[in-house]
Image (spheres, rainbow, N blue to C red):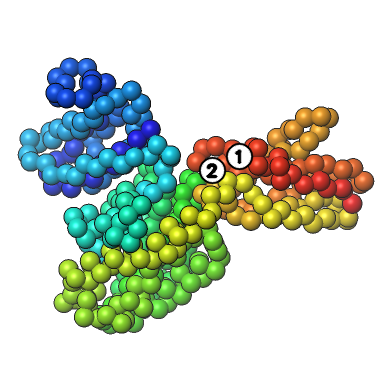
Amino acid sequence: MEWLSLFFVQFFGVLVYRIELNSAAGGSYPKDGWVTAAAVSNNHYSSRQHYINMQDYNWIRLNVKNPDGKSIRLNFDVHDASDGVSDSWIFFGDSITAGSMANCYGTGYAEFVNRIDPAYYPVQQNGGIGGTVSSDGRNAIDEWLSDSPAKYVSIAYGTNDAWGNPNNAQKYYENVKYMIDAVIAKGKTPVLPKIPYSTNKDVGSNTGYYNAMIDKLYQEYGSKLVHGPDFDKFFREHTELLGGDGVHPSSDGYEAMRKLWAETMYANVYTNSQSSDKTYPDNIKVSYSSQYHQIRFTWDTVDNAQNYGIAVYLAGKWRVQTQTISASATSYTTPKGLTPGKTYKVAIAAKVNGKWDISNALKNAVTVTVK
């Protein structure tokens, strides 16, 4: 398998494109034998990612058309994903995200990560849209995630929410919480940075209320939510990196943001991921209700889980009781009225990257007796 990442900078019209493959041997460019691996029409995004099976193919090309006949500018990057999608990122947010997460050659997020550790060079997609607020992200997140194979999803709204409005922090919290849940439900990992400090009083005097909501979300989601850079602290200490309006960073400020993204994610994601590839629930705890004759199971979060499932060993066979437990839940309570004194063997599995780890779930099965 290969991971194919497309980065479009679109200025005119609507792009129509095909990703095409060819099995011809290396050497001269093949004129014939091209097959379509992916096709997009009426594209209205500035960038996309595609996951392409390159087995038995040696050539790849991008066939792009602009119905208006005007010029097209784009980046076209190919990344190896033979071990699965493990280092792909998309950054959603407002104009500050759009400016800071631009794919700048030499000073882009991926380049800064690679400087820290040459073993990594992530796919990085800029999803920043100027003028947007958290409700815009909430209204669009489900569509944006519907065909995105990105593993890590940054949610960076708040500046426009706070601009002249100190009283909307609760709604901001609800919008961001919705987006976090949407990311987790897709089996992806949400990332949430702090809202940047601003010397513009219409913004800077209000961001504290909104960043307090981010602290609340950090506490509620625990390890399920990756902490992004603390841009509030950073720009309080480096106001010289803000532009003339006191809200948007200068060119040097945007570059500093990309660098801080890389440093923070290396500490919070890359370093941690090197020691944690768990694909099954552990630390399973059991509690009993003798009044209602039911049992409650809890377990530790499995990173990137899409769903959890419960199986019970009955009459010599494992039987699935449910496989639709939300990724945001880490508990399951049986129905009431189980037979007192009856013993069951129970396994809890996680679905990660589309696969159920049945083997380890069975190895970690617990035996319980109804009270």
Measuring from the top left, give residue 193's x and y in whole percent: 39, 66
Res 213 visible: yes
Up-down relation of residue 366 to residue 16 (above or below): below
Q: What residue did someone put label 1 on?
A: 357
Q: What is the secondary structure assignment of the residue under circle 2?
A: strand
Q: What is the secondary structure assignment of the residue under circle 1?
A: loop
Res 192 visible: no
Q: Quadrant of the N terminus?
A: top left
Measuring from the top left, give residue 337's x and y in whole percent: 86, 46
In depth, the one of 62 and 321 nearer the eye is: 62
Disc 1 + disc 2, Cβ < 8 Å = yes
Where residue 241 sits, quadrant-wise, is bottom left
Measuring from the top left, give residue 182's x and y in whole percent: 47, 50
For the point 31% across and 41% down, which residue is it? 79
Where residue 324 sits, quadrant-wise, is top right
Up-down relation of residue 157 to residue 344 (above or below): below
Q: Label 1 vs label 2: CA separation?
A: 8 Å
Measuring from the top left, give residue 260's x and y in whole percent: 32, 68
For the point 37% across and 48% down, which residue is it? 88
For the point 80% across and 41% down, which residue is it? 345
The mark that comes first in sequence, 1 or 2, is 2
Q: Amino acid at mark 1?
A: Asp
Crowding near the residue tagged with mark 2, few <14, some 14–19, many ≥20 C-alpha atoms within 10 Å:
many
For the point 35% across and 76% down, which residue is it? 232
Q: Residue furthest right?
A: 341
Q: What residue did someone put label 2 on?
A: 352
Crowding near the residue tagged with mark 1, few <14, some 14–19, many ≥20 C-alpha atoms within 10 Å:
some
Q: Residue furthest left?
A: 70
Give me the disc on residue 189. Answer: none
Q: Amino acid at mark 2?
A: Val
Q: Residue furthest top?
A: 32
